């Protein structure tokens, strides 16, 4: 563990129109779940932009977060196939760019399926988004102080909590 038993991670719910981003810090020297949200947002790109430009803006923004917060790991949600193949391909391209940026900046990459995330946060892989969000508020009381978030942002936070839950098993 670095930084005096603290670990900072970047957690991402990938997308190209909306991207859930979260920086979490966990203090492993304290016995309870001492997790702080250092940064959380839903980063949006304009539909008016060419996809390549959207990809560039996403990459630049994430790289700036990495430089500012200096996370050690990146937790990212695995892509599950949707009925819209065009969307799935573009989200795959975003994931590839994000993985490249994080590897270039020496972050460990961990990928989690939606089932793993739901199971880690709620105890059931069959949970719906509302159940996940309710558990997030129980696990991270500071969320109540933060203004309303968009689903993508909650998904990024849940992915980050999943990463910390899986770290305990190692």
Image (cartoon, rainbow, N blue to C red):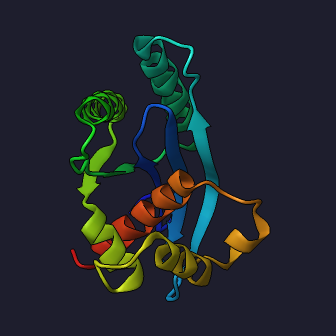
From the top left corner, tell me how far across and down residue 25 is, in percent.
54, 62
| Location of residue 102 by image quarter | top left
Front residue of 71 and 158: 158
Q: Is residue 73 visible?
A: yes
Number of numbered markers:
0
**Which residue is painted at 54% across and 73% down in the image?**
133
From the top left corner, tell me how far across and down residue 143 is, in percent.
68, 70
Q: Is residue 36 left or right of residue 170?
A: right
**Which residue is painted at 35% across and 73% down in the image?**
118
Front residue of 47 and 136: 47
Front residue of 153 and 101: 153
Q: Is residue 23 visible?
A: no
Quadrant of image for the C terminus: bottom left
Front residue of 19 and 71: 19
From the top left corner, tell me how far across and down residue 35 is, in percent.
56, 72
**Which residue is painted at 27% across and 47% down in the image?**
109
From the top left corner, tell me how far across and down residue 92 is, in percent.
26, 34
**Which residue is painted at 55% across and 28% down in the image?**
61
Residue placed furthest toward the front: 83
Quadrant of image for the N terminus: bottom left
């Amino acid at each position: 563990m670095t930084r005096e038993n603290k670990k900072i991670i970047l957690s991402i719910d990938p997308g190209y129109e909306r991207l859930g981003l979260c920086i979490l810090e966990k203090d492993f020297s304290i016995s309870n779940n001492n997790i702080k949200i250092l940064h959380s947002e839903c980063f949006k790109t304009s539909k008016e932009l060419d996809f390549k430009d959207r990809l560039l803006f996403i990459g630049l923004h994430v790289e700036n977060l990495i430089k500012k917060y200096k996370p050690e790991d990146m937790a990212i949600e695995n892509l599950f196939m949707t009925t819209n193949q065009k969307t799935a391909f573009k989200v795959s391209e975003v994931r590839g760019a994000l993985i490249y940026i994080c590897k270039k900046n020496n972050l460990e990459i961990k990928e989690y399926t939606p089932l793993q995330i739901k199971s880690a946060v709620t105890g059931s892989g069959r949970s719906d988004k509302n159940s996940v969000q309710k558990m997030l508020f129980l696990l991270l009381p500071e969320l109540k102080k933060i203004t309303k978030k968009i689903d993508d942002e909650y998904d990024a936070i849940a992915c980050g909590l999943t990463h910390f839950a899986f770290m305990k098993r190692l």
